Image (cartoon, rainbow, N blue to C red):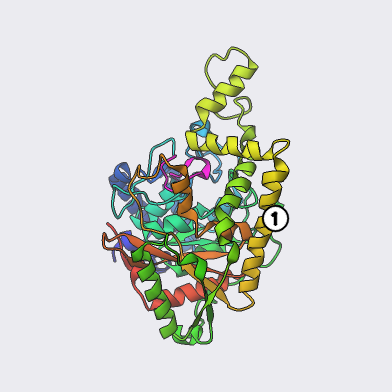
């Protein structure tokens, strides 16, 4: 078996049968990281010593017969999850030397389940970006074409999974930052319902939008990883106090894909199939729709009238929350501090101007403006009202259908530098994902084809709140009759 293409489920089977040790598996991925990361730049920090120590503990647990399905699985972690004793940078100069004194709830739960943390993956600075070009540590390269972006902000995690530099990875999604890079890198990415996964220990961008989720090769792997991540957390006031479903058990239950699809109503939002959608993406989505119909699903057109307002609404609300969240980086308590400041005001101004990159400063300034006296009602309050209308659109659509099927991104991966100087064009990369975050819904991106340049194409399934099990079941059914997710760039 090619370990570089191994799924989480396959790795777990090998480990539990003792056909492979956790140390051997971890060492394999550390060697691949050494070989390919200098080119891809997917990892910021690699913790070889810590990973091997975790692997030895996992092997001991497996030998005692006390292992979970995640024990011994090598994991990559997006570099905004606080990891106690392991550098957490948020891909920013501001936190380039930050060593957290505590552990995020998500990484703590996965470590307790026996997972092996290989290191921290590159990302857009403070998760602000759609291409992974705003990182202080340099851009990540798409494994399918090194001249192109992998998507963002979780581009490092997406590239690491696609290139076989880990078995699975953690990402976060504020406006599409799991799903868009998953689509552009040819992997599976799940953005859970807001509050389904704890945000404690995640360095905040926009607190009402941020959500952690799994990035994996297959939907089955996403279900396995979500099972270990999800659940109520008293340390997070936005965490939902509701029992976690058995996502893995509900994937199939011994029922064929055709039986699971029979009677399923899939909505196709007409606003998503517009002139801005590339021909190759449109063609791949049409073929996916036909495949679902062949399996017995009923596909029908629905309308989400407020779709056009998603981008302006998001780029008022998200920068406003970022402005508030990033106010703590003042050069005093932690993070970057400028050298030889003239006085306190100079230290504040220079520490922030030198510590933050251009995109972060742009969003802080925009957010501060829309929250300022005289503009709050005109911009921020109005955006919150439109946000409610966007959520109502989805609620109305779900009275007609069981889930929605859309493109994840309007085009395949573009070239590095192609849109960096035009923020508006860059923001439009998330046009099909942003409104899901505004409504707090779960959404799944999975591969559904390739374009003429052999670049991956992703489709998005959107579900009702807390219906991750339904999305995973439908996505798994699609992957049982297609092989797009099994293709690999390296």
- Residue at 49 percent across and 53 percent down: it is 177
- Residue at 43 percent across and 42 percent down: it is 422
Mark 1 secondary-structure assignment? helix
- Residue at 41 percent across and 36 percent down: it is 137
From the viewer's perspective, tell me whether residue 59 is left or right of residue 34.
Answer: right
Which percent across, then down, holds residue 150?
38, 51
Q: Report which residue position mark 1 lands on.
A: 385
Up-down relation of residue 146 to residue 341 (above or below): below
Is residue 406 shown in magenta? no
- Residue at 31 percent across and 53 percent down: it is 143
Is residue 125 shown in magenta? yes
User: 471 or 297: which is nearer to us?
Assistant: 297
- Residue 389 at least partly seen: yes
Magenta-drawn segment: 121-134
Up-down relation of residue 351 to residue 11 (above or below): above
Which percent across, then down, holds residue 229?
57, 59
Q: In terms of secondary structure, what is the magenta stretch mainly? A: loop
User: 77 or 13: which is nearer to us?
Assistant: 77
């Amino acid at each position: 078996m090619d370990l570089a293409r191994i799924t989480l489920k396959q790795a777990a089977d090998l480990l539990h049968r003792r056909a492979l040790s956790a140390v051997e598996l971890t060492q394999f991925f550390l060697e691949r990281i050494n070989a390919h990361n200098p080119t891809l730049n997917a990892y910021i920090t690699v913790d070889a010593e810590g990973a091997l120590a975790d692997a030895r503990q996992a092997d001991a647990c497996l030998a005692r017969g006390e292992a979970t399905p995640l024990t011994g699985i090598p994991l990559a972690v997006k570099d905004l999850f606080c990891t106690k004793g392991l550098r957490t940078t948020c891909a920013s100069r501001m936190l380039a030397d930050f060593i957290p004194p505590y552990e995020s709830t998500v990484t703590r739960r996965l470590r307790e389940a026996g997972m092996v943390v290989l290191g921290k993956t590159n990302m857009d600075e403070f998760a602000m970006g759609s291409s992974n070009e705003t990182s202080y540590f340099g851009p990540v390269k798409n494994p399918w074409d090194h001249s192109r972006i992998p998507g963002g902000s979780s581009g490092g995690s997406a590239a690491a999974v696609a290139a076989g530099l880990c078995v699975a990875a953690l990402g976060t999604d504020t406006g599409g930052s799991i799903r868009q890079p998953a689509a552009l890198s040819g992997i599976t990415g799940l953005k859970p319902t807001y509050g389904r996964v704890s945000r404690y220990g995640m360095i905040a961008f926009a607190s009402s939008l941020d959500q952690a989720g799994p990035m994996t090769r297959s939907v089955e792997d996403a279900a396995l990883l979500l099972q270990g991540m999800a659940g109520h957390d008293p340390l997070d006031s936005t965490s939902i106090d509701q029992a976690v479903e058995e996502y893995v058990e509900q994937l199939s239950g011994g029922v064929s894909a055709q039986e699971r699809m029979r009677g399923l109503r899939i909505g196709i939002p007409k606003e998503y199939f517009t002139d801005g959608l590339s021909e190759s993406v449109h063609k791949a989505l049409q073929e996916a729709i036909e495949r679902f119909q062949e399996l017995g699903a009923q596909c029908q057109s629905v309308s989400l009238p407020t779709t056009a307002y998603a981008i302006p609404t998001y780029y008022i609300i998200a920068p406003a929350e970022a402005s508030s969240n990033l106010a703590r980086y003042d050069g005093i308590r932690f993070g970057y501090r400028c050298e030889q400041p003239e006085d306190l005001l100079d230290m504040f101004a220079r520490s922030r101007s030198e510590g933050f990159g251009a995109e972060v400063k742009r969003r802080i300034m925009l957010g501060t403006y829309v929250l300022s006296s005289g503009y709050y009602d005109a911009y921020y309050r109005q955006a919150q009202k439109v946000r409610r209308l966007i959520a109502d659109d989805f609620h109305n659509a779900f009275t007609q259908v069981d889930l929605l099927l859309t493109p994840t991104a309007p085009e395949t991966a573009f070239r590095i530098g192609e849109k960096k100087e035009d923020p508006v064009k860059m923001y439009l990369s998330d046009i099909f994902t942003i409104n899901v975050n505004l409504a707090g819904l779960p959404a799944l991106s999975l591969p559904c084809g390739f374009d003429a340049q052999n670049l991956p194409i992703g489709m998005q399934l959107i579900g009702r709140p807390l219906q991750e099990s339904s999305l995973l079941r439908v996505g798994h059914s699609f992957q049982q009759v297609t092989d797009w997710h099994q293709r690999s760039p390296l």
